[in-house]
Image (cartoon, rainbow, N blue to C red):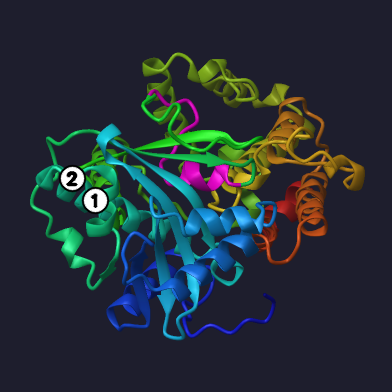
Amino acid sequence: MRGRRYALDIGGKDKSKSESALHKAFTEGRLRIVVETTQDRCVDAMILFKAKNLFGRQLSKMPGEYILRQVFDPKHACMMFVDEKDNVVAGICYRPFFERSFVEIVFLAVDYEFQVKGVGGFLMDVFKEMIKMDIKSYENDYMNDVMAMCRICRKEVKYLDMFENEPDRSGRQSLYLIAYADVFAVGFFKKQGFCEDGVFDKWIGYIKDYDGGTIVECKVFWEINYLRKDEVIELMRRRVDEEMRNVNGYSEMHRIEDYSKVKSVRDIPGINKGLDNMKCISKIDSGVNDMKGIPDINEGEERAGDKDKISEESEAKTTMRMFIMYMICDLKMNACAWPFLKPVSANDVPNYYKYIKKPMDISKMAKKVEDGIYKSVREFEEDVRQMITNCLSYNGKDTQYYKCGQVLLKHFEMRMETYKHVVDKIG
């Protein structure tokens, strides 16, 4: 529904700030986390109906009657984020198969106003921690599947510390999440730890089959508190950072006092030391120098030792190529780049190439760099903008893809502005 007003406000598209805002909203009572199932006679049917409407809006290709049946099926439950006005802003409809060590995710949706803001990731993190507690209750009470639904599903999460204080985080049976993902959702699921080439097979013959969908699975680790995963990752980064400081002094800052003296890449302060470090790494990983498009380290040293044989034009091309490669890597690292990594499949989106006459994606740009097709940074910039234009023109403003396109374009423009002096110099 366009123009819908929600009581919940989690700010802009900065993921880290949005997740902090979500935690704060929950703590202050502006966001509720509830679980409902029709197995319980006290079920809040209105909240379930609102969840059904959310799934219907976001999963437009799914028949409304089918969604209604699944949401109100007693074997299913819905975990939802609800704001102060009782609007469902995000939700997961699922069916537990605890006796077979997995949970089927039937539907997952986030309202378009809250997409690309970390809501989906936070929803999944809470869900993983919740089903850990639920399967423990199931095991301890020796319940069967249907009886367990009544006990474990209708609840409201009052505080997130109930997950953080969980004493037993290891040594328990394996637990998996299984979902059918369409081509547009695979990227999201992969960011949440799902994979397509899984080994778990106890779901076969038990879950619903969808045409055109891809089975994805995620192992839920008992030893990880998913609500604190960012802290764990930050701790690991600090450890790696400390080790790298001891190895190669990579953190040393080098300032360029006079840009007019920078005639080539090797004139950048500290670059030669960096190449020496790369040479050490290449001895460990012999495959580094075999990568297409990346100059051999020794070859680079020969060029440095015999500059008279290298034309300025060749040096400029190398600089341009390295810069474009850097920009492509930077784009790929962005959290909103997943819809643009590969070409759109004509099998998954049959009419795409009927409307999009100049298709472009990040893999195609990388291939053009490898083949030496780009003659200037401006040509690369035109391809990036063409890729985003295709996305914005084909997808509706309410879709996740449109929002990803907006975020990636803003990120790219900020990067180009930051390196404007470099672009002006190399063309």
Location of residue 44 in the rendering, given as x and y in whole percent from the top left corner:
39, 73
**What is the CA distance from the residue labelled 1 to the residue labelled 2?**
6 Å
Q: Position of residue 123 (x, y in %)?
A: 40, 60
- Disc 2 crowd rating (10 Å Cα; few below 14, some 14-19, many 20+) is some
Residue 288 placement, left or right of 151: right
- Would you name the residue on which mark 1 appears? 148
Q: Which residues are magenta?
A: 185-199
Q: Which residue is mark 2?
A: 143
Q: Is residue 188 magenta?
A: yes
Q: Residue at x 37, y 77 (%)?
A: 31
Q: Where 360 sits versus 373, above or below?
A: below
Say which of 221 and 391 sits in front.
221
Q: Nearer the viewer, residue 78 or 108?
A: 78
Residue at horizontal 64 percent and vertical 59 percent from the top = 64
In the displayed structure, would residue 199 be above or below residue 382? above
Q: Secondary structure at mark 2?
A: loop
Q: Residue at x 53, y 74 (%)?
A: 12
Query: Among all residues in the image, which is located at the extreme front?
Result: 41
User: If you read the primary sequence from the N terminus, does the residue marked by circle 1 or circle 2 appear first?
Assistant: 2
Residue drawn at the location 48% of the way across and 65% of the way down? 90
In this rendering, the answer to whether 36 lies above or below 243 is: below
Task: Please tell me whether residue 129 is drawn above or below residue 139 in the rendered image.
Answer: below
Badge 2 amino acid: Met
Magenta segment's dominant SS is loop
Tell me if residue 379 can be seen.
Answer: yes
The amino acid pointed to by label 1 is Ala
218 lies left or right of 9? left
